[in-house]
Amino acid sequence: MKKKTARIGQRLAPLMVIPLLLLSPFSQAGTLIFNTEEYPPFNFVNSAGNIDGFSTRLLEAALDEANLSATFRLLPWARAYTEAQLREHHCVFSTARTPERESLFQWVGPLVVTDWAAFALTDSDIQASRLSELENLRVGSFREDAVGRFVEDSGVPILVTAADRENISRLEAGLIDVWVSSETVARHIATEAGVSIERLFTFNHAEMYLACHLSVPESILSRLQTSLDTLRSEGQYERIRERVLKQWEREP
């Protein structure tokens, strides 16, 4: 009998490569790999060393509902994204679904919705209300991030780093003037670092998805999408979200 992915609340995806499926029909073609990054509270490593977060738990619940399994891996974002684009049976989350990325992947979701915003230190004298006003400032993002790409495409130069978490220390050290990121993520990272930031303005509203390589069978993705829709209609979506946020507040 196939070993099913654990029910929500029993255990979470172990860090890095611990396979969660052995005998499902899909495993005969290749293990389904879900890559992710540190992007709290959507996906992150918890105090027990496991991959956690709202998107992670939601995908675990969807896999369980669809009688499917997957291997979860935590990687730097640029690698996680590139592998999902280039390697068969790989997916990446939580991924902004943009027009530029549309044809590169198959999509399941949305998992979460977030606002993109520009931030400065609270005691900064920077004032801006639109992207065009950032053109002469040092603006930070990270590699392969849709937020930074969006800002860069608007004509604002971007200084990138390996991970979004590094931008809070760059901001505090004066290496960048403004940080562009998901509002939810930026506030969690700043709180964790004990740094006070101020939102200058919001410039986009984005839906985040599971993005899968074109080799992943459509039947698998359809089952996952149906499971996500069921979880949402039955109220599981909000219950999972509340549990993750409460846990995050207890152990930032």
Image (cartoon, grey):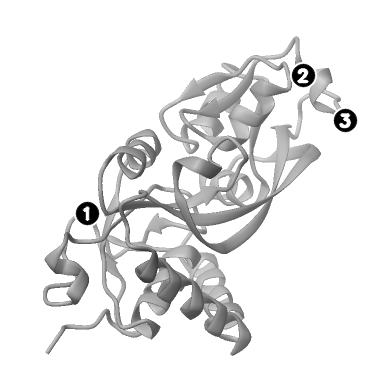
Label whose residue precedes the other's in the sequence (3 or 2)? 3
Q: Is residue 90 above or below residue 53?
A: above
Label 1 secondary element: loop
> Where is mark 2, residue-wise?
134
The residue shown at (32%, 57%) is 216
**Does the image show residue 14?**
yes
Q: Is residue 107 above or below residue 199?
A: below
> Where is mark 3, residue-wise?
129
Q: Amino acid at mark 1?
A: Met
Q: Is residue 119 left or right of residue 63?
A: right
Out of 208 and 164, give the one closest to the viewer.
Answer: 208
Q: CA distance from mark 3 to mark 1?
A: 40 Å
Q: Amino acid at mark 2?
A: Leu
> Where is mark 1, residue-wise?
16
Q: CA distance from mark 2 to mark 1?
A: 38 Å
Q: Is residue 168 above or below residue 72?
A: above
Hey, which residue is sitting farthest top in the picture? Answer: 136
